[in-house]
Image (cartoon, grey):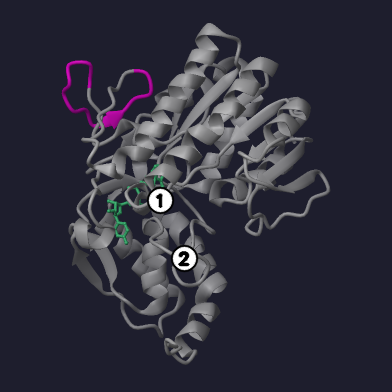
Amino acid sequence: MSEARVPRVAVLGAGGFLGSHLVPALLQRFSCEIDAVDVNLSKLECHDARVQRIEARVEEPGLVEQVTSRCQTVISLTALCNPAQYSTIPLEVIDASFTHLLPLVTRCAERKVRLIHFSTAEVYGRTALDAQGHPTERMHEDESCLMLGPVSRERWTYACAKQLLERVIWAHGQHGALPFTIIRPFNTIGPRMDFLPGIDGDGTPRVLACFMNALLRGEPLPLVGGGAQRRAFMDVSDMNEAVCRVLERPKQADGQIFNLGNPDNDVSIAELGRLMAGAFAELWPAHAAAKFQAVSAEDFYGPGYDDTQERIPDVRKAQQLLGWKPQRRLADALPAIVRDYGERYGARIEAARKAPCRLASA
Ligand code: UGA
């Protein structure tokens, strides 16, 4: 257990993918108490006595008052972060990433509560640019320019809302006394990410859950635009370690923006699919071999979608200031993730498949 003093922490979004992994990791590392806040805490499979489970929305009256009056640190993770939502429910996306969080930032600034805010790699937009506007391979926190698409490309609604909140937080830190750290996660993956459509959610989740859904149902894995676009995937255990170090090192982390991702796990989406299909076949050889199907972005997401072809983080700052380096290779991480999805959802998918079709009643 760490020597660092971390008395009481509020984790907003503790029932989401990252939050449900982070809470147990914090308990293991620190002798802290945690206010675990989410509208739904069912993914938080942790019943430690040091955790107070609070089922509430962040925008609910009184919630911000409650957590900022008794916690010394707030970790804010809440957002609607699936690209399919940006062009279908953009106003909800803006509220969840900006409007609903403004009172939290203001109150943290007034009370000097340390705010560790999760922003997103999406703020870099389509591609990272240097100061002259030339594309660069890696995205750097303090140097890259940010390039979103036209307003009609609603894909960038989320990035824009997230970027504006980053600027509000930054201004409170520069011109006030808010102790803050902004984290930009790059495609973090692990068990319990998102949902499987028709089983525990509706709509289109992010690519890992889309591919698991297809594998478990024996359907082709959809490759949007053919799947040549690339992402650098990071295992959630590396994210937990980085956040613990941010907590342990306030002097180094305060006032900083950190990319947290794994540049060594940069693969095309088609390659991710092949790796997942390989891990799946090893675990369940009796299943039919995976198939792939190219789909257009318009057919898959509808109008307003746009994409980034490559998203590689420069993580030298986190390495220098936090002494952190992501460890887990994608090929090593995927089998355990694929197994968890299979064990969690396999029987439910089978039951849904066998259930008689319900006929629509007049
Ligand atoms: C999303 C969020 O918008 C980011 O804010 C966030 O940082 C990121 O996830 C994350 O997980 O950290 P993105 O990487 O575009 O960004 O999200 P995915 O939905 O996972 O899509 C990755 C790529 O796979 C996209 O090019 C998408 O078109 C493609 N895809 C997705 C497929 O080819 N097939 C699918 O079934 C689903």
Nearer to the camera, 221 or 237: 221
Choose top left, top right, bottom left or bottom right for residue 274. Answer: bottom left
Q: Nearer the viewer, mark 2 or mark 1?
A: 1
Choose top left, top right, bottom left or bottom right for residue 292. Answer: bottom left
Name the residue located 27 percent from the left edge and 66 percent from the top edge.
222
**In this picture, residue 2 sits left or right of residue 95:** right
Label 2, secondary structure: give it: helix
**In this picture, residue 38 sits left or right of residue 158:** right
Residue 315 x %, y %: 40, 29
Nearer to the camera, 45 or 318: 45
Name the residue located 46 percent from the left edge and 27 percent from the top edge.
165
Residue 144 x %, y %: 29, 22
Nearer to the camera, 73 or 99: 99
**In this picture, residue 78 sits left or right of residue 147:** right
Quadrant location of the C terminus?
bottom left
In the rendered image, the residue lying farthest to the front is 362
Label 1, secondary structure: give it: loop
Identify which amino acid the numbered label 1 is placed on. Answer: Asn
Comes first in the chain, label 2 or label 1: 1
Name the residue located 17 percent from the left edge and 16 percent from the top edge.
132
Q: Is mark 1 within 8 Å of ligand 1?
A: yes
Determine which of the numbered discs, if any, sits on residue 338 in the image: 2
Q: Is residue 275 above or below residue 176?
A: below
Determine which of the numbered discs, if any, sits on residue 82 in the image: 1
Residue 192 x %, y %: 54, 59
Choose top left, top right, bottom left or bottom right for residue 156. Answer: top left
Which segment did they paint magenta?
Answer: 130-142
Residue 166 at least partly seen = yes
Q: Is residue 206 above or below residue 62?
A: below
